[in-house]
Image: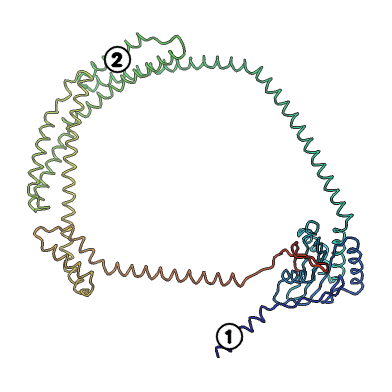
Amino acid sequence: MKKLILLFVLLSTSILWSKIPVPTFTNNAINDYANLIDATTEAQLNRMLLAHKDSTTVEIVVLTYTDIENETIDEFANRVFNTWRVGNKKTNNGAMFILTLKPNRKYRTEVGGGLEGILTDALTKRYAEKIFKPKAQAGDVSGGVLDLITAYIKETSPEYVALKKEEEKLAAIKRAQDREAFNATMISIGIVLLYILGLAIVIGGPIFIIYTFLRRAELRKEAREKARFNVLAYLVSIEKKLAAAVKIGIPNAQEVLEQLLLSYKNFTKENPPGGKNEIDEQKHIDVINRVTKSVISHYDLYERVWNESLKTSSSDFKELYERIQLARKRLETLSSENIFNKKDLSTDFNKKASNLESKLESSRGLFKNSTSITSLEASYEEFKEINDDYTWLLFWVESIITKADKYIEAKRWVEKNTKRVEKYANENSSHVKVAKKFEEVQKMQKAQVVDYIGLATAMGFLLNIIPQERRQAEELDRARRDRERRRREEENSRRYSSSSSYGSSSSGGGFSCGGGSSFGGGSSGNW
């Protein structure tokens, strides 16, 4: 039975892919197997093509055929062309025009290698579409073939070929002349541009030098005016700061600011504006600006440090003490509850807080005797050190309190969910991961000091084991379905690609009763 099936498959395949035999050459230029050309036109074409062959050795034949079955027009034309050997063996100067009725009305011009430069693919395609196709679609196949073959004879006649070569030669000469004329024009334009450029240099050079000199003088004047304006603005700013310092009663502010202002005035007096040259003048302006800004920045430092010092004798100082006392009480409560097993935590904090409080008390009059910039900066650095100690202490204790609050919150959660966890573990005791995690939870519950944060984490993980595995399984199943869907889409795409095809032009060539071969070109289409 298997042998019969195999034999049937082989016979079906051979029938499906078998090619029709090449039709016999009739020893005439026109081989009308499909009876598409009338007798008068056929006789006329035979005479024309025979005379053309005798005078030029170019051989052009026509074949009409009824049904080429499963073979494409390009393949069929190529086989016939090679079998009939159209054209001269040495020059391979043959061409064949073929028409078929089935499976679709097709036409093709097959050209040997010797005529490929004359009957190009583009030319045969254009002639077929413009000359043959309109008449064939109108029902006059004979007229279409006659006009097309007449055009091919004209294209391959020596006189026409020579005329085309002469036209191409004349066109090349004209292009060369055009290039020479263009080059001459560009040279003339270049000479004119060079002349204009030289004239611009001769005339424009002195003008540019004069403009540069005047512009630099104008810029120097603008710089002096700007420097003078800046100095006046700085002086006004210093006067305002002095008035403000006196008004708010900053200790020694007037003495310090007047000292700075005096040094500034002495500097400007010893260094008047102007210089031997532009560079000296610009340096002087830069120094004046720098010294003026330095005076203002020194005073700003004094005023900022004084404002900071006010905190040690204002409500801010009181608030600082209150925050320390609040932290002390909170730590005493946490120590009594044995949080983190650190009973000495409150004692440690009290020691550090008392040291900081004594420093704060000593800093109350820290800035009152600062009569110079140097002593002021020293006081400021000392106050910064005290402030840094205070900031660090509060950060330390607040981090402990925050952790303790998390600890208490975890403890409440554990107490609330202990029964739920035990019930969940008993219901899923056969699950290996659940049972193992429940043993770990029980050990943590029996510890001398219970780590409630770690215990809450372990209990939450235990409750999430099975839901997590279920989600992972769902994700894996979803990924598997996606892969299967993509695989089916790819198979369908490949199956569609292998079963779809469409016509295209191909190259083929030379038939010859005289020995041509198929290494030329051609074009095909529907009619």
Extreme-bottom residue of the structure: 1
Q: CA distance from mark 1 to mark 2?
A: 115 Å
Kindly indicate the quadrant of the structure image that contains residue 210: top right
Q: Amino acid at mark 2?
A: Leu
Residue 208 at x, y percent in the picture: 60, 18
Circle 1: element type? helix
Q: Which residue is mark 2?
A: 261
Of 195 and 392, nearer the camera is 195
Tell me the quarter of the picture where residue 272 sits.
Answer: top left
Q: Nearer the viewer, residue 451 or 433?
A: 433
Q: Position of residue 426 (x, y in %)?
A: 18, 73
**Which numbered tag is attached to residue 450?**
none
- The quadrant of the image that shows the N terminus is bottom right
Up-down relation of residue 409 to residue 82 (above or below): above
1 vs 2, front mark: 1
**SS category of the residue bearing label 2:** helix
The residue at 10%/35% (across/down) is 355
Tag 1 near tag 2, CB within 8 Å: no
Residue labelled with disc 1: 6
Query: Where, quadrant-wise, is the C terminus in this rendering?
Result: bottom right
What is the residue that sits farthest to the front in this orientation? Answer: 90
Q: Tell me: residue 247, above or below residue 30.
A: above
Tell me residue 184's x, y (percent): 77, 32
Please indicate whether residue 180 sits to the left or right of residue 481 in the image.
Answer: right
Labels 1 and 2: the sequence-earlier one: 1
Residue 102, quarter of picture: bottom right
